[in-house]
Image (tube, grey):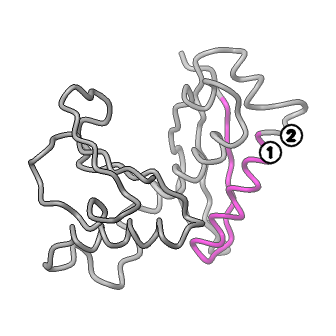
Amino acid sequence: MKQAFHSQPGTHAPSPAAKSPNTQSVGNPQRTGWPHFQEIFMLSALSPEDVRTLKQYLLAQARPGPWEFHSGVLTSQTPEEICTNIIREKLLEYLPQEVPYSVQQKTVMWDEGPNGELVIEQKLLVPKESHVRILIGPKGHLISQIAQEVGRNLMDIFFCEVQLRLAVKLLK
């Protein structure tokens, strides 16, 4: 049986999810986990019934009003934020344990090159010498692979050639 957990019983109108035969509302004032969530859904995106239950809940919660952004706006992120987030994504994908979480990113250069390409240089600052070695990888292959993948992603996003340089430095 699916469950919709209520952290604060009686403080909201029942949702369609709570009325669903496959959803059980649980109101436990002793519960300490997830205190800021009105409902929590345990579901599978592979189940059409589960998706329908979530969709009904979201539609019931939606309120009419003006859009926060114009329909032509794809994101509220700056190009620099997009770049930094894509680099962070690759660091999380390739680096083990706590290493990606200890990396500080600093954009050193963001310019247009002589042929219209986007030239980006970012320093990746890490607190330990061992993290420097891990991030660079054997013979520099790991940092090179990360830079190539990020560069390809940025070309797809910005529709121009991108030259990306990543420099790994020990945080001082």
- Name the amino acid type tagged 1: Ser
Residue on which the image places disc 2: 141
Please tell me whether mark 1 sits on a helix, a strand or a loop. helix
The outermost residue toward the right is 139
Please give the range of residues in magenta.
143-168
- Name the amino acid type tagged 2: His
Residue positioned 54% across, 59% down in the render? 44
Residue positioned 22% across, 63% down in the render? 15
| Location of residue 85 with respect to 44 vertically, above or below | above
- Would you identify the image quadrant in which residue 78 lies? bottom left
Residue positioned 61% across, 77% down in the render? 159
Q: CA distance from mark 2 to mark 1?
A: 5 Å
> Which of 78/63 is in front?
63
How far across and down, in percent of the image, does residue 56 sit? Answer: 32, 72
The main secondary structure of the magenta stretch is helix
Pointers 2 and 1 in contact (C-beta within 8 Å): yes
Q: Which mark is residue 144?
A: 1
- Would you identify the image quadrant in which residue 116 lies? bottom right
Crowding around mark 2 (Cα neighbors within 10 Å: few <14, some 14 to 19, many 20+) is: few
Please tell me whether mark 2 sits on a helix, a strand or a loop. helix
